[in-house]
Amino acid sequence: MRQARSEPAAHAVFAAFGASSRKGLNPARERADAGVVTMATAAGCGILGLLVGSFVNVVIWRIPRKESIVRPASHCPACSATVRPYDNVPILSWALLRGRCRDCGERIPVRYPLVELACGVLWAGLGARFAGSWALPAFLVLGAGLLALSVIDLEHYLLPNRVVYPLGITCAALLGVAGVADGDPAVWLRALVAGTVAFVAFFVIHVVAPRGMGFGDVRLSFVLGLALGWLGWGYVALGLFLGFLYGAVIGAGLIATRLRSRRDHVPFGPFLAAGTLTAALWGQSILDWYLHR
Ligand SMILES: [Zn+2]
């Protein structure tokens, strides 16, 4: 059965709450219901995002150090004391402990609560944007993965395969499920083709200008093309263009302010991630504005 995207899930939610799901019965009421669903989804995803942010911190610390992300339990890098569950509440624990380990007093970098906050805000935004869409889980995973990759790239100048590969496989699988649930598997094929097109384009750029872009960026481009391709070809063009634009503008800014010299390596991953997330969150408005100026 073929239905317009984003409607089936929303209707299922309406039905679950006993609200009218018959179209056209009361448009104002339906709009109000949709607003409530959007807000509830955003709030739920935001809270979940704070908790997932803690896990993103674990990934950021352990993956570049080739440690397991499951075992052992979270511990202080300085004194190895296991973090107590009540000291593991996102943002709040860091604030209550005034940014220090309860056992040895070693500083806990402000990066930890910031990553948790960023993940919460990002998930709330994605929850609002994809409320009622089967693609929501895929984009939540994408958001958390891109956040982890961005921080790792800023710190270590690398995009580890141990994050990029699972991220790509999980997003592809979740979007496949979404395509079947929407009754429109062709959208999934478009996503896979878009991922491949992005990969080939980035590979060519990497071969022509290897200094600007590492092979990690080429691998990541498949994941970005995949997610953007699910939304449409306009989003693929917009998201990747914004990645290059952010990189060029901020790169030029860093050189102009002498924070970096022309020879320094500037990680590209965070810009690509930001471009893709901008397109996923606000792409429709940007494309409408661009096409109907
Ligand atoms: Zn400690």
Image (tube, grey):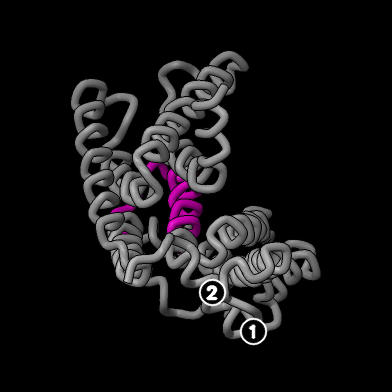
SS type, badge 1 = loop
SS type, badge 2 = helix
| Residue 107 % position (x, y) | 69, 59
Of residues 143 and 291, the one drawn nearer to the viewer in this rendering:
291
Marker disc for residue 11: 2
Residue at the (27%, 46%) spot, across then down: 195
Left or right of 174 on screen, residue 140: right
Residue at the (49%, 72%) spot, across then down: 9
Report the span colored magenta: 141-162
Residue 247 vs 79, above or below: the answer is above
The answer to whether one can see residue 109 in this image is no
Quarter of the figure that contains the C terminus: top right
Of residues 65 and 32, the one drawn nearer to the viewer in this rendering:
32
Question: Mark 1 highlights which residue?
Answer: 17
| Residue 198 % position (x, y) | 27, 38
The quarter of the picture where residue 64 lies is bottom left
Left or right of 260 on screen, residue 211: left
